[in-house]
Image: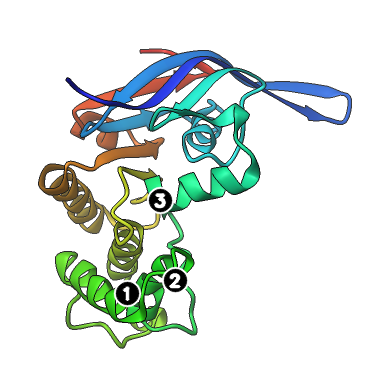
């Protein structure tokens, strides 16, 4: 039987900005199973980023249930949420968020330091992850010496080094040219098929929505299709 790794049930998220009330999510429900390759798509202001924050344990719902890997986030404290993020979820962002002063290898090793993994194992796993994304020869380069596509590959390697169940990518091709974007999407597809990693891509780009196995379209805080 398939394992449900993401579950949202009647999720509402309301933000208060002074006297104004903004309902970013208005009762969203869906499930994502282990090994799915899914996009959450919608225009700016649709609620997709709020949805991503729920899945990434970066925010809690105003009402409704959010469960990640079987654990309900609303009843977890900040330490438990941080641990769930660090172990279960790998994050990839549009702007890479690499540390400029660190080498490619050091950037990729960093998440394992927070998991208190032995330095020797951190080194070997980082080399392995970089080789897997085609950057085995760039270990000692720094981010400013890389192209946009190479930086995103480093970010993907860093996200995958903890061997997460879920890879959550926020507009991962948004800063890339179309050809490089296609290459990065192929890398996500390979990770999904080879490792069985659940890949969730948050995007406004219909081309990405059309290229994945399943696309959840959000508009005005509701699931459109």
Alpha-carbon distance for marks 1 and 2?
A: 7 Å
* Disc 3 target residue: 87
The residue that mark 2 highlights is 113
Labels 1 & 2 near each other (Cβ < 8 A): yes
Q: Quadrant of residue 109?
A: bottom left
Residue at left offset 32%, top offset 74%: 122
Which one is earlier in the sequence, the residue at label 3 or at label 1? 3
Q: Earlier in the sequence, mark 1 or mark 2?
A: 2
Q: Which residue is mark 1?
A: 122
Asked if labels 1 and 3 touch by Cβ distance under 8 angstroms, the answer is no
Residue 68 is situated, as x and y percent measured from the top left of the image, at: 43, 32
With respect to residue 91, does 6 lie above or below? above
| Side of 9 where 112 appears, left or right | left
First in sequence, mark 2 or 3: give its number.
3
Apparent side of residue 113 relative to residue 216 in the rendered image (left or right): right
User: SS for tag 1?
Assistant: helix
Residue 129 in the image: above or below residue 62: below
Q: Are marks 2 and 3 in contact (CB under 8 Å)?
A: no
Q: Picture coordinates of residue 85 (x, y %)? A: 47, 47
């Amino acid at each position: 039987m398939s394992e449900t790794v993401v579950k949202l049930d009647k999720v509402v998220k309301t933000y208060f900005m002074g006297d104004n009330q903004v309902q970013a999510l208005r009762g969203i429900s869906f499930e994502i199973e282990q090994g799915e390759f899914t996009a959450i798509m919608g225009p700016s202001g649709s609620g997709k980023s709020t949805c991503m924050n729920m899945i990434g344990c970066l925010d809690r719902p105003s009402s409704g249930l959010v469960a990640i890997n079987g654990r309900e986030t609303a009843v977890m404290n900040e330490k438990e949420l941080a641990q769930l993020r660090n172990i279960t979820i790998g994050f990839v962002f549009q702007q890479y968020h690499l540390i400029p002063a660190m080498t490619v290898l050091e950037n990729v090793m960093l998440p394992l330091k927070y998991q208190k993994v032995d330095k020797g194992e951190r080194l070997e796993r980082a080399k392995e992850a970089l080789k897997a994304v085609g950057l085995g020869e760039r270990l000692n380069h720094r981010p400013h010496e890389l192209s946009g596509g190479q930086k995103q590959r480093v970010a993907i390697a860093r996200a995958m080094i903890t061997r997460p169940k879920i890879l959550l990518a926020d507009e991962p091709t948004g800063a890339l040219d179309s050809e490089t974007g296609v290459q990065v999407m192929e890398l996500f597809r390979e990770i999904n098929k080879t490792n069985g990693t659940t890949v969730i891509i948050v995007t406004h780009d219909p081309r990405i929505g059309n290229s994945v196995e399943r696309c959840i379209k959000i508009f005005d805080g509701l699931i459109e299709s």
